[in-house]
Structures are given as structure tokens and as C-alpha cells.
Image (tube, rainbow, N blue to C red):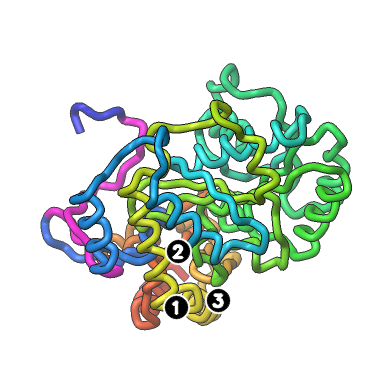
Amino acid sequence: MKFLFQNYARMDVCFAHGNGAYIYDTDGKKYLDLVAGIAVNSIGYAHPKWVKAVSEQAARMAHTSNLYHVKEQADLAEKLASITPKGMTKSLFVNSGAEANEGALKLAVRYTKRKRVLSSLNSFHGRLAASLGATGQTKYQESFEPLIPKCFDYFKFGDAEEFKAKISKDTAAVILEPIQAEGGVQIASKEFFKTVRDVCTDIGALMIVDEVQTGMGRTGEWFGIQNYGITPDIMTLAKALGGGVPIGAIVTTPEISSVLTPGTHGTTFGGTPLVCAAASATIDIMKDEKLVQNAKTLGKKWTSDLKKIKFNDVTEVRGLGLIIGIEMKTHANDVKAYALNNGILVNVCHLNTVRLIPPLILKESEAARFTELLKEFALKYN
């Protein structure tokens, strides 16, 4: 660690390898991973079909350039079009969720020729300049204000009336998450999302949905926004898309995509043959093993089981599919430490929310391990 920046508050553990839903530290201790690299490793670790696809592609060609046609990009874009909402058939590949959101904002401003962007408070859209501006949490923006564009306005997530009061004919886009993941697994109503969709359509603003953490089956649908019966204008993806390698994507309609002409946006590493082969394999595995359905079925049962635990420190259990937040008064970090000591990895976000974002290959018996552990913990503190 001597030669690294100290910008991460790291837990005192280092991992050497993983297999399935389990990860092993450098001393050989085995952990059930309910964090999945922060919702990245949705097909688990070292899935043999994924490893084969990546190894074979690496042996052929890991990187070329977007100066040329890239077959693996075209193949992946076609596979994405088979799972995205109707009409969203154009993809642009980048390297991360933050980059996808930056590109989506550029796309919206160029398409609408408008100057303002509306985002929700408590959101998280990344740490680059524009995506940091879209992130409606001052704790992330503090000290970086000189770099943040002044085009952003904010509304309370889930508050349709405040949203309607803030949007205007100068609004190029509204960017929001189907579930505020980093914000504590916060969920809004179907009526709220329908209002956002209808008002955006009426006023001519684009609706950008950040599916970086909620996309690729996490919520029990391919994309989180599908839980609300809404089709956005633009979606951004990353995290689970590559099965463990860095890739992001902007997905939209042919009409909207047409305004990004040569020279208007690009990236050296976006959509390399290696990461596209990994993402294509990930989609195939998710389809073949019915992981989206597993997320829905198992997530529903797990959430129900967690709600039955009698623990006076828990104020709410909420989630969709396999993104679950356990809101606690004071003991979230104690639960995380207790789980670590007992060979289970969980995450805490937004101060006191224990967040469960496991691989989508998770089995019912594995989910039950954490449920029983939380019961044990509750007995100690009730």
C-alpha cells in the first residue's frame, strides 16, 4: 500500500481468487460474497464459459482501435438490442458508468440544444465533472465545485410535484436511477416514474435512466426501469455488463444516436474486442442460466425472510430482486464487521444501510446463511 493513493477506506482483507459466489483471501479463508465487486460480478467468479470467451479473445486480439470496425462491438450491440426496451437499438461503448453518464449528458444536450439538466437529490451518477454535477449529494461535490458545470438543478427523488415545478422548456434532460443504490436502496413509486416520462415527453426533455447498478438483471428484470413499465430515451450501463471487466454503454434510439457524428465523442479503450467478448459471454450466460428470473424469485423470498427478523435496530428492509437495503439505526457497520468475521461480505452505504448486491447465481441456501447470521446478531443486541 506504500505506493498507492490513500483515497479508499479499505477493509483489512485482500483477496486472491474466487469461484462462483465465493471469494478467497490471501490466507485462504473463504467468504460468501454478497457485494459482488459492488454489483459487478453478477455471474460470479471464474465462470468457465466467461473465462473461455475472454481467454480465447485475448489470444486473438485484446485491443484494436475505433479507427476501424470492431466485430466484437457489433456482436455485443446486437445482443444488447435483444434485451433492451423496444426501440433502444443503438449502443456506444465506453469504460465505466461515469463515462456512460457523461456521454449520455453530452448526447442529450446536443440532441435538444438546451442548457439545463435536472437530477434528483441523493443520487449517484459518478465522479467525473459532469457526472459529479449530476450526483445530487454535496459530500461528493465538496472541494471540486470549480470543475462542476453550473447547469444542474435538483429535485427530491420520488416527489412528482417538486419534479414538475423544477423542469422547464430549457431542460435538456432528466437523469435518475430506477433505485437510488448508493443512496441507500431508495425506491420511488410507479406513478412517480410515469409522471417523469409523461412530462419529459410533453416538454421535449430526454429521460436518461442510469442503470449502472440496477441493470443487467439485478432487480429481477433486465433493467430496473422495466419494473415501472417505462421506456426512457437513453439508458446507461456498466458494472455487471462485462462480468468483471471494465465496460460501460450508452443505449438509445437510432434517431437520438444520430447526433453524435464523428469527432463529437470518443474513447481510446471504449469497446475493445476483449471487453466486448466478455460482455457478450455475460449476456449469454445470464440467458442460459435464467439469472434474471433467479434474481426476481430469490430476491422476493429473501426480502420477505429478512423482514420477519425481530430486530429493533432495523427500521426498514427494501429492495427489488437482488438489490436489498436493510436500514438500521446504529449497527450497520457492526453487522458488516460481524459478517466479515463469519466469512460473509456485505456492504454499507448511505451511513446506515446494509446493502446486499450478490452475484445473481446466488442459491437460496446461501442467502439463508446471511439471514441466519443477522438473526444471531439481533439476539446479541436486542
Which three-letter amino acid code belongs to the residue tagged 2?
Leu
Query: Which amino acid type is shown beneath numbered disc 3?
Result: Lys
* Residue count near mark 2 (Cα–Cα under 10 Å), binned few <14, some 14–19, many ≥20: many
Q: Which residue is mark 3?
A: 307
Between discs 2 and 3, the one toward the N terminus: 3
Q: Is residue 173 magenta?
A: no
Is residue 227 shown left or right of residue 263? right
| Residue at image mark 1 | 290
Q: CA distance from mark 2 to mark 1?
A: 20 Å
Going by the picture, which residue comes out furthest to the left?
A: 27
Residue at numbered disc 2: 356
Q: Which residues are magenta?
A: 6-26
What type is the residue that disc 1 sits on?
Lys
Q: CA distance from mark 3 to mark 1?
A: 26 Å
Name the secondary structure under disc 3: helix
- The residue positioned 47% from the left and 50% from the top of the image is 238
Position of residue 261 measured from the top left corner of the image (x, y, whole percent): 60, 32
User: Could you say which is closer to the camera, residue 187 or residue 336?
Assistant: 187
- Number of numbered discs: 3
Q: Is residue 12 magenta?
A: yes
Do labels 2 and 1 touch, CB within 8 Å? no
Q: How many other residues sit within 10 Å of disc 3, few (<14), some (14-19) or many (≥20)?
A: some
**For this view, does 128 lie left or right of residue 274?**
right
